[in-house]
Amino acid sequence: MSESNSFIEEKLMPIASKLSANKYLTAIRDGITLAMPLIIIGSIFMVIASFPVPGWEAWLGKVGVAGYLWKGVNSSFGLIGLVASFGIAQSLASQYKVDGVAAGIISMASFVMVTPFIASEAGEGLTVRYLGASGLFVAIVLGLFTAFIYQWFIKHDIQIKMPDSVPPAVARSFSAIIPGAVIITFWLITYAVLDMMSWPNLHELAQVVLGGPLGLLGNNIFGTVIVAGLNSLLWFIGIHGGNVVNSIMQPIWITNLAENTAAYQAGTEMKNIITVAFMDNFVYLGGGGATIGLVLVLGYIARKKQTSKQTKILAPITVVPGLFNINEPTMFGVPVVLNFALLIPFILAPAVNAIVAYTAMATGLVPLTRVVASWTMPPILSGFLTTGSINGSILQIVLIILDILIYLPFFLALEKRFKAQEENAPLY
């Protein structure tokens, strides 16, 4: 055990810590997080527009409300790529200690620059096709590129400097002119070259170059099990697995959900099983490692008279947050981190959840996810909202039971250890 701990502390921890603190992964995570409220708001509009009650959608159409609700979906969910382009650049530039807002605005302008306009009788305009989830890959590229180039210009003092008497806000605006002009011009030339050569636009190229490889990992059950396992392993060594793994995989999961949303709105077949809602509400029940099974076992055992004092103390601070998918108290309180007694179920539970949920949806027993619920939405309720079916809630109940059964024998063994420590007695 000591050799394993030594290997983790000396070899794995430094690598994982560097990944977790990586500026670029942090920027991607922050940028997508900035857009997350729009995803949730758009999902609320969609739940109202498509609430699974017979005749509900027809009634909304009859009274003339349906179109406005879908307008709400497109005006929130349909802007996450544009917002992420700002957020990613803003986060990375701020980490470089330069003006993040200016970098974000330049990135957002560059995003619009590389996005094709749609001609209509009213003139040219943008389409939510690229402003939304389909634009996430371009948002990542432009956001990181813009912030890096912007900070290079500023730190090399290639900027317009104003006298000290000029208000700071005005001075910062002038400082952004030279780097902004260079960056936006670069992306204008890029768009022009692709357009004149009749090649795919940057959004389509990004879907192939970035979306293709990520899709191989994130669009099938084998890759999903690997991703869930990596998330658990990172958490096990004390690194927030979601911050590392989700930063990489979220763009493909969000894009898949957006495609399902568009398909539902158009009345066509939804095709993507693995989405951000699938991962949050069916794989990571209770948080990373599907720890809802662990906290429910802990809460049940804590009610018994002969239970260890440690378990009784842990129950109130882990069970309630765990039901709302907040598992940091569990991770560091039980703890799960660096606790080899819980490593197997911590990896196994989300993998089982992924396989069972995928099978249930692939066979048509449960509808595919088409909206997101807030990540703090308790299970059973979130299963209904994300799938629009009571079968989604039933599936979550089945998964929770499986998670309880997976964690139960391992926590019972851990409980014996707690009692032995309190009684100052040997384990065997």
Image: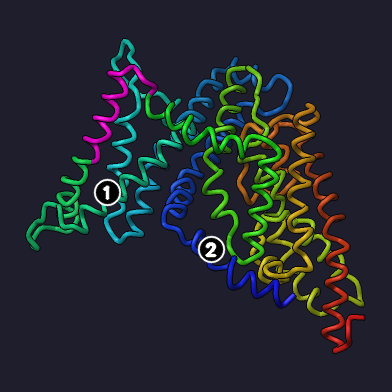
- Judging from the image, what secondary structure is the residue with disc 1 in? helix
* Color scheme of the displayed model: rainbow
Q: Position of residue 322 (x, y in %)?
A: 71, 59
Q: Please give left or right for residue 300 compared with residue 62 in the image.
A: right
Q: Does residue 249 show up magenta in the picture?
A: no
Q: Residues within 10 Å of mark 1 (few under 14, many from 20)?
A: some
Q: Position of residue 229 (x, y in %)?
A: 68, 52
Front of the two marks 1 and 2: 2
Q: Position of residue 325 (x, y in %)?
A: 67, 55
Tell me if label 1 and label 2 are in contact, CB under 8 Å.
no
- Name the main secondary structure of what is drawn in magenta: helix
Residue at 89%, 81% in the rendered image: 427
Q: Amino acid at mark 2?
A: Ile
Furthest-top residue in this view:
121
The answer to whether residue 324 shows anywhere in this view is: no
- Judging from the image, what secondary structure is the residue with disc 2 in? helix
**Image quarter (top left, top right, bottom left or bottom right) of the C terminus:** bottom right
The residue tagged 1 is 149
Relative to 414, residue 402 above or below: above
Highlighted range, magenta = 183-200
Residue at 56%, 43% in the rendered image: 249
The residue tagged 2 is 15
> Quick one: 366 or 48, which is closer to the camera?
366
Q: Residues within 10 Å of mark 2 (few under 14, many from 20)?
A: few
Q: Amino acid at mark 1?
A: Ile
Q: Earlier in the sequence, mark 1 or mark 2?
A: 2
> Quick one: 199 or 247, which is closer to the camera?
199
Q: Position of residue 33 (x, y in %)?
A: 49, 48
Q: Please give left or right for residue 362 compared with residue 267 in the image.
A: right
CA gap between label 1 and label 2 equals: 27 Å
